Image (cartoon, rainbow, N blue to C red):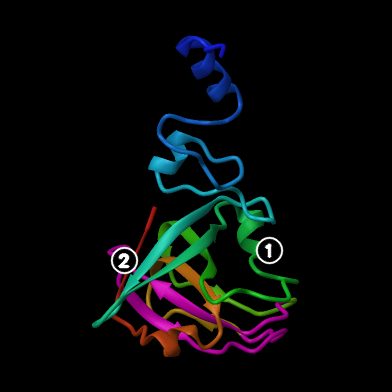
Amino acid sequence: MNKIPKAIALSLMLLSGFSLGGCYARTGETAANSQQGELALSEAGLKQVPLSIRTSDAVHGFVVEVAESGDQQAQGLMFRTRLPSDKGMIFPFAEDRVASFWMKNTVIPLDIIFIRRDGTIESIAADTIPYSLDPVRSNEPVATVLEIAAGQAAALGIEPGDRVTWR
């Protein structure tokens, strides 16, 4: 039986995508972004990150798309026909501001969660109305807005004052 030298075997494993640190199941993920909590890009081409919400009795995990640019934030979840219960979109702002959103061209109802700079939830606009042009606003300046599937905030017991963390 022929033995393959260790150096050749290791080279073949590395060329085939095997990593000594494990195999990465997420398409396009590297060791560096795995350690930073980044996931593969979403179907819409946006960066995805893990997010958690700590309520009084549990921690709830989501994978959220990050709408970083002005164009990404303007597009948001428009034209999407579904949003799984463990997914969402986060809108980080460079400076705190009273946030105002509308549901124009948004097909699915959403829970819109307004988050202060310290990570606490300022308010929640539950079950927003698809296609509505009525503004949905925070009550005070916020640093971030999170959109999740309608009804999820109530189902998970998410309330103002709960803490949101994400990378």
**Where does label 1 land, which residue?**
75
Residue 127 counted in the magenta span: yes
Inspect the image, locate mark 2, and give the three-letter code of the amino acid beneath it. Gly
Between 160 and 44, the one lying in front of the other is: 44
**Where does label 2 land, which residue?**
119
Image x and y of residue 164, in percent: 34, 68
Q: Which residue shows up at 47% across the image and 30% down it?
A: 19
Q: How far is disc 2 from disc 1 in space, using C-alphas?
A: 24 Å
Tell me whether the residue at label 2 lies in contact with that at label 1, contact meaning CB atoms closer than 8 angstroms.
no
Packing grade of label 2 (10 A; few <14, some 14-19, many >=20) is some
Residue 142 versus residue 69 in the image, above or below: below
SS type, badge 1? helix
Is residue 18 found left or right of 120 in the rendered image? right
Between 27 and 78, the one lying in front of the other is: 27
Tell me the quarter of the picture where residue 97 sits. bottom left
Residue extent of the magenta highlight: 106-134
Q: Which residue shows up at 49% across the image and 62% down it?
A: 63
Image x and y of residue 114, in percent: 42, 74
Q: Earlier in the sequence, mark 2 or mark 1?
A: 1
Is residue 143 found left or right of 82 in the rendered image? left
Q: Which residue shows up at 47% across the image and 69% down it?
A: 145
